[in-house]
């Protein structure tokens, strides 16, 4: 296996709670995944990234882990897990686990022991601090610093038993581990080795760029209109981050780095950071998830503050990353995951007449860039955002906490806040996978933990897997193209028609072979001057997303949401 096998690989993310339920309790499980392995094989993906399946109180759907070496009974047993792993391997598909080690659950034995007394041997495994000087524990403003949690409220929780606060960048049930302590790092590396020894093929690492903190934990600036200070400058790419990841590489990956895949989830990273994290010579990670393109439609108020992103914004940003990691490092490419609203509703058009075409157009742009593409469950069907009607329709802690803070504390208009949630809530990605038009979308025979998108009667796998013109069939072709074409896997990238406000167009090139990708990311016809694409006159159409995408050459016109791929050799 080549050292960089993942350059021609496509990864599929499974969010187990919402993928398939085998036992009728309304929650997806491992046996549900086992029952749908053929779906993955037909699509042609090379790797599955499985969101957390470990023991957890599920305050944040498993991103709060109480035992890293146990399967949560909700999802199944180790027997099920081994069967899943074997089933994937038998189909030539690797399995990458989610690694959540910036924090644990507050129900993890490490935290319980740490909280038990001021002089517990594990006290220093988490970030405990006394109240702010001069203030009583629990008094208003007595938190050790002014940071806000990502899930609303302060980033500190008081533990009345010892009178100290602990840091939690996410929910109060997700205390941050103290990576300064070498025992913490050893315990994490041990656990990672244990999973790799069991046969898993790598890790997706949750907010791994937050693990090194400025130890003095200073107050952050409070942005206008916000309640809390910004801690990011003190934990995003903290002082020892590269040291920790290099150490992890030495202690866990060394000797097997060629067969595994490591991808760090890194909100807020810049190109310069990403080059450092993914430069093979530095031996840290294979690739990172950056967030710039999925933050383009966020205004100054953050993720709930809507600011439309233009085609120009989107392509300039993605092209910048293509160029930035051209010589050193590697991009991961994604539109969707379990934290993002559905791309077809966000940068496409989910109305019936354009849903499939725009889903395919967006898929084309993403899959033919240089990098490793990730497909989030349901994206291959063109699954769309959900018409949530009331706050009771949501389950996500981030969403529910934001609603409570915005409406109850800040006094904002409830209807306006609901509109923000409908557009941006993570639950848009978390409704059940749509398998068929059977009740509950064929996801469960019971009552699903969150209601399916009512469009499942039309948008579902049963309708799409064997339909030649479906989003599914088109994704298959895109994945197949990456497998077959060294130009797609490893060619150079050049943006063309760079200032065109509707077209996202680029050329990939390697060893004298080249592809031209020409995609209209709007619902209006797009005109261009063929003279601007000189040299492509005789190229042949190899892929098109519309029923009548026949080879008309470069005719100066791209239909609404049309995607065209030409080849020149
Ligand atoms: O979705 C977000 C809120 O807008 C992001 O800030 C998200 O919280 C961030 O990308 C980190 O995400 C990861 O860690 C979280 C977990 O809730 C997410 O599901 C996970 O992907 C805490 O473990």
Image (cartoon, helix red, strand yellow):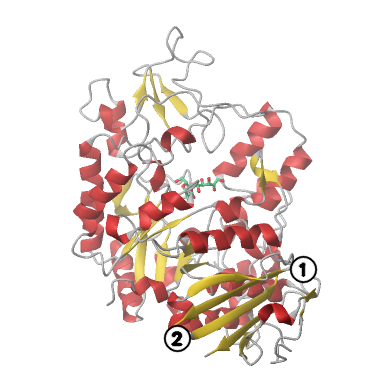
Q: Quadrant of the N terminus?
A: bottom left
Q: Is residue 302 left or right of residue 271?
A: right
Please name whichever residue, 381 or 483, is drawn nearer the observer in this view of the structure.
Answer: 483
Please name whichever residue, 242 or 251, is drawn nearer the observer in this view of the structure.
Answer: 242
Asked if the residue at label 1 sits under 8 Å from ligand 1, the reply is: no
Image location of residue 115, percent across then percent down: 31, 27
Q: Is residue 480 left or right of residue 239?
A: right
| Identity of the residue drawn at 54% across and 14% down | 140
Location of mark 1 (residue):
351
Image location of residue 279, percent across then percent down: 34, 58
- Which mark identifies residue 484? 2
Mark closer to the observer (1, 2): 2
- Residue 477 location, quadrant: bottom right
Of labels 1 and 2, earlier in sequence is 1
Image location of residue 161, percent across then percent down: 35, 19
| Identity of the residue drawn at 64% across and 60% down | 314
- Which mark identifies residue 405? none
Query: Does residue 456 sit above or below 152 in this rendering?
Result: below
Q: Secondary structure at mark 2?
A: helix
Mark 1 neighbour class, 10 Å CA radius: few under 14, some 14 to 19, many 20 or more: few
- Residue 64 location, quadrant: top left
Q: Is residue 144 left or right of residue 543?
A: left
Image location of residue 340, percent across then percent down: 58, 55
Mark 2 neighbour class, 10 Å CA radius: few under 14, some 14 to 19, many 20 or more: few
Q: Is residue 517 left or right of residue 164?
A: right
| Residue furthest out toward the right | 524
Q: Secondary structure at mark 1?
A: loop
| Residue furthest out toward the top | 134
Label 1 and label 2: CA atoms lie apart by 33 Å
| Identity of the residue drawn at 20% across and 50% down | 190
- Mark yes or no: residue 58 visible: yes
Q: How many marks?
A: 2
């Amino acid at each position: 296996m080549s050292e960089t096998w993942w350059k021609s690989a496509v990864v599929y993310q499974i969010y187990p709670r919402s993928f398939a339920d085998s036992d009728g309790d309304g929650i997806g499980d491992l046996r549900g995944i086992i029952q749908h392995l053929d779906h993955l094989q037909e699509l042609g993906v090379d790797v599955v990234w499985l969101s957390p399946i470990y023991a957890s109180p599920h305050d944040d759907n498993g991103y709060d882990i109480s035992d890293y070496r146990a399967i949560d009974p909700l999802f199944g047993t180790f027997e099920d897990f081994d069967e899943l792993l074997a089933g994937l391997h038998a189909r030539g598909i690797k399995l990458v686990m989610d690694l959540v080690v910036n924090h644990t659950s507050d129900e993890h034995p490490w935290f319980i022991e740490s909280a038990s007394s001021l002089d517990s041997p594990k006290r220093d495994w988490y970030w405990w601090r006394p109240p702010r000087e001069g203030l009583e524990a629990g008094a208003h403003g007595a938190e050790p610093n002014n940071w806000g949690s990502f899930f609303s409220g302060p980033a500190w929780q008081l533990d009345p038993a010892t009178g100290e606060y602990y840091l939690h960048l996410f929910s109060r049930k997700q205390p941050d581990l103290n990576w300064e302590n070498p025992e913490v790092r050893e315990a994490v590396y041990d656990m990672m080795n244990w999973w790799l020894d069991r046969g898993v093929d790598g890790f997706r690492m949750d907010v791994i760029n937050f693990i090194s903190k400025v130890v003095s934990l200073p107050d952050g600036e409070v942005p206008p209109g916000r309640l809390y200070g910004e801690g990011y400058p003190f934990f995003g790419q903290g002082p020892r981050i590269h040291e920790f990841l290099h150490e992890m590489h030495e202690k866990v990956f060394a000797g097997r780095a060629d067969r595994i895949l490591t991808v760090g989830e890194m909100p807020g990273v810049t190109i310069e950071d990403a080059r450092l994290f993914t430069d093979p010579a530095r031996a840290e990670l294979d690739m990172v998830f950056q967030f710039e393109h999925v933050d383009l439609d966020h205004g100054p108020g953050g993720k709930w503050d809507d600011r439309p992103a233009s085609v120009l914004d989107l392509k300039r940003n993605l092209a910048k990353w293509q160029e930035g990691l051209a010589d050193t490092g590697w991009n991961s490419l994604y539109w969707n995951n379990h934290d993002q609203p559905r791309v077809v509703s966000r940068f496409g058009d989910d109305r019936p007449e354009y849903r499939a075409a725009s889903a395919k157009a967006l898929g084309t742009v993403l899959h033919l860039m240089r990098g490793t593409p990730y497909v989030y469950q349901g994206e291959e069907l063109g699954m769309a955002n959900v018409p949530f009607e009331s706050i009771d329709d949501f389950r996500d802690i981030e969403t529910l906490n934001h609603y409570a803070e915005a409406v109850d504390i800040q006094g904002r208009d409830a209807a306006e806040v609901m509109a923000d949630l409908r557009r941006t809530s993570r639950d848009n990605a978390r409704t059940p996978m749509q398998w068929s038009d059977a009740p509950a979308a064929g996801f469960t025979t019971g009552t699903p933990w969150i209601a399916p998108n009512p469009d499942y009667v039309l948008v579902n796998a049963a309708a799409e897997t064997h339909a030649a013109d479906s989003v599914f069939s088109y994704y298959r072709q895109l994945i197949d193209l990456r497998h077959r074409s060294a130009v797609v896997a490893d060619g150079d990238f050049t943006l063309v028609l760079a200032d065109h406000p509707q077209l996202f167009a680029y050329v990939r090139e390697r060893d004298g072979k080249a592809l031209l990708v020409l995609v209209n990311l709007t619902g209006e016809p797009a005109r261009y001057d063929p003279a601007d694409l000189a040299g492509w006159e005789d190229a042949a159409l190899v892929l098109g997303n519309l029923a009548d995408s026949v080879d008309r050459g470069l005719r100066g016109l791209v239909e609404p949401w049309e995607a065209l791929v030409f080849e020149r050799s």
